[in-house]
Image (cartoon, rainbow, N blue to C red):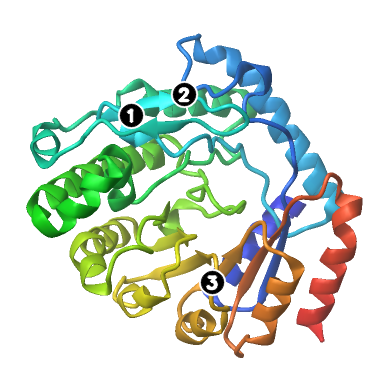
């Protein structure tokens, strides 16, 4: 059994809670996505022009993971920007200097939201991810996992599409219009993920943090707009579609960098909530105490003191996966790798 297969088994055991309690994955810093070519979802150039850049990027990531001796499974990382699905509804994707592209809202009121038609996954910002994935699968072989792009939640995509000031007012004054748009975003996401799994049965369903999650463990998304809404609003505008996605795909992994501790009780209502990637504003203890029975805690770009805080709060059934991020080389990351491994083994 090769190293990749050993790590796949190790991570599956970690995800299922049947053995290990800690996974450590070195996240290489390989530069801006697409290099000089830029973000492939924004361009009209033939998608073939990006193939060799992503092949080389995968090879670098695989080599550095091997050198590090971490627990990762190398994959082709197609994560680009948060606006892919919003663009399909008519939003302009704008490239900002020194940052990822982002979608500008195309809806300013409930009437405009109601008039939006249901887009297809054939829209270029979406279809180009599948087209590039197919070309890379042909180049690298079907055993190399292709990752999903950035996946925002249905509510999160609706909040990108709709001018934020009016969107927040409409949660109170025009809730039905909001829910109609969120439902359309959910339907588009489901259609995309079903096609992704069909094309890439060995794909990686996680876009953030940097980790491998195969399709049998469900879908992964970001729910970043919920810090400003109340628990009843979360249950009305977010929870039904999170439940639907989890039931459709056999589980849910959720990134949330919002100040959202107030929603933990609602999070518990999501069936098969398999993993949480949180930014903690009031410490990690409450999250670990409430979700150790069900979820893996995955963290990226996290200071060592926060990782240690999480380990200090751990329960016998707590499981963690930490990215070692921000290091130029495996040699720079190795001391932290050794300290964390020693903690969990002590």
C-alpha gap between disc 2 and disc 3? 33 Å
Location of the N terminus by quadrant is bottom right
Q: Nearer the viewer, mark 3 or mark 1?
A: 3
Left or right of residue 115: residue 128? right
Residue 186, horizontal then vertical, whole percent:
24, 47
Per the image, the residue denoted by label 3 is 281
Per the image, the residue denoted by label 1 is 87
The structure residue drawn at horizontal position 84% and vertical position 65%, both measured from the top left corner, is: 336
The structure residue drawn at horizontal position 27% and vertical position 62%, both measured from the top left corner, is: 247
Per the image, the residue denoted by label 2 is 41
Q: Are marks 2 and 1 in contact (CB under 8 Å)?
A: yes
Crowding at dot 2, Cα within 10 Å, few <14 / some 14-19 / many 20+, comes out as many
Residue 163, horizontal then vertical, whole percent:
27, 40
User: Relative to the observer, which residue lies in front, 211 or 335?
Assistant: 335
The furthest residue to the top: 45
Left or right of residue 259: residue 171? left
Q: Earlier in the sequence, mark 2 or mark 1?
A: 2
Residue 240, horizontal then vertical, whole percent:
21, 63
């Amino acid at each position: 059994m090769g190293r990749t297969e050993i790590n796949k088994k190790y991570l599956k055991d970690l995800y299922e809670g049947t053995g290990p309690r800690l996974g450590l994955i070195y996240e290489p810093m390989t530069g801006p996505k697409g290099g000089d070519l830029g973000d492939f979802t924004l361009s009209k150039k033939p998608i073939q022009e990006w193939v060799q850049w992503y092949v080389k990027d995968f090879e670098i990531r695989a080599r550095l993971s091997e050198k590090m001796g971490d627990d990762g499974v190398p994959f082709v990382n197609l994560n680009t920007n948060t606006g892919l699905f919003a663009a399909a509804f008519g939003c302009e994707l704008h490239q900002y200097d020194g940052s990822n592209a982002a979608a500008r809202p195309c809806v300013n009121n409930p009437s405009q939201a109601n008039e939006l038609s249901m887009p297809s996954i054939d829209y270029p910002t979406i279809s180009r991810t599948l087209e590039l994935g197919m070309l890379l699968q042909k180049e690298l072989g079907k055993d190399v996992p292709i990752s999903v792009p950035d996946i925002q939640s249905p509510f999160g995509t609706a909040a990108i599409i709709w001018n934020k000031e009016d969107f927040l007012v409409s949660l109170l004054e025009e809730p039905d219009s909001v829910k109609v748009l969120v439902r359309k975003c959910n339907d588009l996401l489901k259609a995309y993920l079903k096609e992704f799994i069909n094309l890439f049965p060995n794909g990686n369903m996680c876009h953030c943090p940097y980790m491998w999650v195969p399709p049998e463990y469900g879908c992964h998304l970001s729910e970043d707009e919920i810090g400003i809404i109340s628990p009843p609003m979360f249950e009305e505008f977010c929870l039904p579609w999170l439940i639907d996605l989890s039931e459709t795909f056999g589980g849910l992994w959720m990134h949330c960098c919002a100040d959202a501790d107030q929603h933990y009780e609602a999070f518990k209502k999501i069936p098969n909530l398999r993993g949480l990637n949180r930014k903690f504003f009031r410490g990690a203890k409450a999250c670990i105490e409430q979700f150790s029975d069900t979820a893996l805690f995955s963290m990226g770009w996290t200071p060592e003191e926060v990782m240690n805080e999480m380990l200090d709060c751990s329960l016998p059934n707590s499981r963690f996966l930490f990215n070692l991020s921000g290091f130029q080389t495996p040699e720079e990351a190795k001391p932290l790798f050794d300290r964390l491994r020693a903690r969990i083994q002590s």
